[in-house]
Image (cartoon, rainbow, N blue to C red):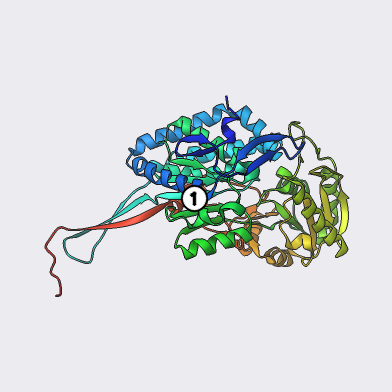
């Protein structure tokens, strides 16, 4: 059974303890405002201790037999599976995630752990030909060393584990800074799983800290070789800039403004199903969510009518109710920001096709119709249960409107002609695209990442191995070499 009191502390150098800061963070339930946990925050000194502990433990872990590292990862998976009901409860309490959302996220974490358990046996070397007689070239894939991970509040277990599991499996040490609003589900919960699985003390460290207090100490510390970040594009740009000055590698999954395209031959019932799932899962607080639904004018009104009818029936309220689809946004600031975008879009000419009530941090779904590309709701990543429905004349205009964004994470198209869908997919400037499905997809074996302002690098599968390892060339001269001087 999970001890929430223990999980409300820092996990540094194999010990559960308070941070050194004088400040305490109240981790609050976004639905009812109750306090889930109180964290004595970490300082830059705590960050330093965590990185040093990770570096020492990593030396030990890197020498562990790959089969044993695999067994540790498999134990972590078994431990995770045993906590299912408690984890789902934590997701509701800490971040307002519905039962549906929590169940999806729980399974994604299982998939990431299962895939990462194969990594220790897939870090293969190569023998390469040489131009010099008698030379043998060995190319070795090795752990990078220590990885610094920063994760967001929206899918905290998934987006932390997506980096944490492969980093550990590949032989690295880790310091993870979860978002303060998801300090347990995105941080200490995962540390508990690996602690029980038997990783060396200090290999996994969790620091819950306020950037206003620690500044860039997490990024500029000399020990981490790689920084992995999932979050907003604005913060991602800053991280990339700071990491670049310190010659650190970065893997960044940033914001999105995904488009779901409904072509004139679409199955409209499928289009509605895909659009509802793509926009309203976890209240629209997913980087892959479809901010924009772009429908060809021949089917626009028919789609909009079916879509609004379905959206109007979505249950909103307490995330602990298994029937709830739309729970609370993470905090009041996000509610106010979202409503400001809605109001601005209406002033710009968007038509309100449906608008649900606002109750505390729970924002009822909003469908804005007749949206033009220059409107606020079409330009910004809204991160809430608001969707912009945009009419276009044809497939060509649909692609042009979809590409009229700084972002390029994911997208989708609904059409009865699969190859037509693939043609559209090839033209839309995203790292991922789905034909006859929603925009929200993640697979443990498939490269995950974006283009343009949506990120750098790829997670999952063989690409996860590449992101969290380094290559070393060792040559052996077996015959005496004749030097030119």
40 in relation to 456, above or below: above
Q: Is residue 51 left or right of residue 321?
A: left
- Nearer to me, 217 or 80: 217
Q: Residue at x 63, y 52 (%)?
A: 434
Quadrant showing the N terminus? top right
Does residue 167 show up?
no
SS at badge 1: strand
Taking the image as shown, residue 106 lies to the left or right of residue 258, namely left
Residue plotted at (72% across, 65% down): 401
Q: Is residue 418 visible?
A: yes
Rendered view: 380 above or below 52: below
Work out which quarter of the rendered image holds the C terminus and state it: bottom left
Would you identify the image quadrant in which residue 340 lies? Answer: bottom right
Residue that sits furthest to the bottom in the current view: 485
Residue linked to disc 1 = 148
Q: Position of residue 43 (x, y in %)?
A: 54, 48
Q: Is residue 436 left or right of residue 75?
A: right
Task: Give the total number of marks visible in the rendering.
Answer: 1
Q: x, y percentage for residue 395? A: 72, 64
| Percent x, y of residue 356 | 86, 46
Q: Is residue 226 left or right of residue 293?
A: left
Image quadrant in which you'd find residue 61: top left
Residue that extends furthest to the front in the rendered view of this protein: 22
Q: Is residue 136 above or below residue 325?
A: below
Label 1 crowd (10 A; few <14 / some 14-19 / many >=20): many
Of 54 and 445, the residue lying toward us: 54
């Amino acid at each position: 059974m999970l001890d929430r009191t223990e999980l409300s502390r820092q996990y540094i150098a194999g010990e559960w303890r308070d941070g050194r800061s004088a400040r305490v963070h109240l981790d609050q339930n976004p639905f009812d405002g109750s306090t889930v946990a109180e964290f004595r925050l970490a300082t830059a000194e705590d960050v330093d201790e965590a990185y040093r502990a990770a570096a020492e433990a990593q030396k030990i872990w890197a020498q562990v037999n790959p089969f044993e590292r695999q067994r540790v990862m498999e134990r972590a998976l078994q431990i995770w599976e045993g906590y299912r009901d408690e984890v789902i409860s934590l997701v509701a309490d800490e971040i307002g995630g519905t039962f549906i959302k929590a169940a999806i996220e729980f399974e994604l974490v299982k998939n990431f752990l299962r895939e990462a358990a194969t990594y220790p046996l897939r870090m293969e070397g190569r023998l390469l030909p040489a131009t010099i007689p008698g030379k043998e070239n060995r190319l070795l894939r090795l752990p990078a060393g220590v990885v610094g991970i920063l994760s967001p509040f929206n899918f905290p277990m998934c987006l932390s584990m997506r980096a944490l599991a492969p980093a550990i499996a590949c032989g690295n040490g880790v310091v993870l800074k979860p978002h303060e609003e998801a300090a347990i589900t995105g941080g200490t919960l995962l540390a508990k799983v690996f602690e029980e699985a038997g990783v060396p003390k200090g290999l996994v460290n969790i620091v819950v800290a306020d950037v206003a207090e620690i500044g860039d100490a997490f990024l500029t510390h000399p020990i981490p070789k790689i920084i992995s970040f999932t979050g907003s594009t604005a913060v991602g740009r800053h991280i990339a800039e700071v990491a670049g000055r310190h010659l650190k590698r970065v893997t960044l999954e940033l914001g999105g403004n995904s488009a779901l395209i409904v072509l004139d031959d679409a199955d409209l019932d499928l289009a509605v199903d895909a659009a509802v799932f793509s926009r309203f899962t976890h209240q629209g607080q997913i980087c892959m969510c479809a901010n924009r639904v772009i429908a060809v004018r021949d089917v626009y009104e028919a789609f909009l009518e079916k879509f609004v009818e379905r959206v109007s029936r979505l249950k909103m309220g307490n995330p602990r109710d298994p029937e709830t689809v739309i729970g609370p946004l993470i905090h009041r600031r996000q509610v106010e920001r979202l409503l400001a975008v809605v109001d601005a879009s209406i002033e710009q000419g968007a038509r309100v096709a449906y608008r649900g009530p606002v109750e505390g941090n729970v924002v009822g779904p909003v469908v804005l119709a007749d949206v033009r590309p220059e409107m606020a709701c079409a330009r910004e990543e809204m991160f809430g249960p608001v969707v912009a429905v945009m009419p276009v004349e044809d497939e060509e205009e649909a692609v042009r409107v979809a590409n009229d964004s700084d972002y390029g994470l994911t997208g989708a198209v609904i059409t009865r002609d699969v190859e037509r869908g693939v043609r559209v997919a090839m033209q839309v400037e995203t790292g991922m695209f789905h034909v006859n499905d929603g925009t929200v997809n993640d697979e443990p074996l498939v490269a995950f990442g974006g283009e343009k302002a949506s990120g750098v690098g790829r997670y999952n599968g063989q690409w996860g191995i590449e992101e969290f390892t380094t290559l070393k060339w060792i040559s052996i001269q077996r015959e005496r070499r004749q030097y030119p001087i």
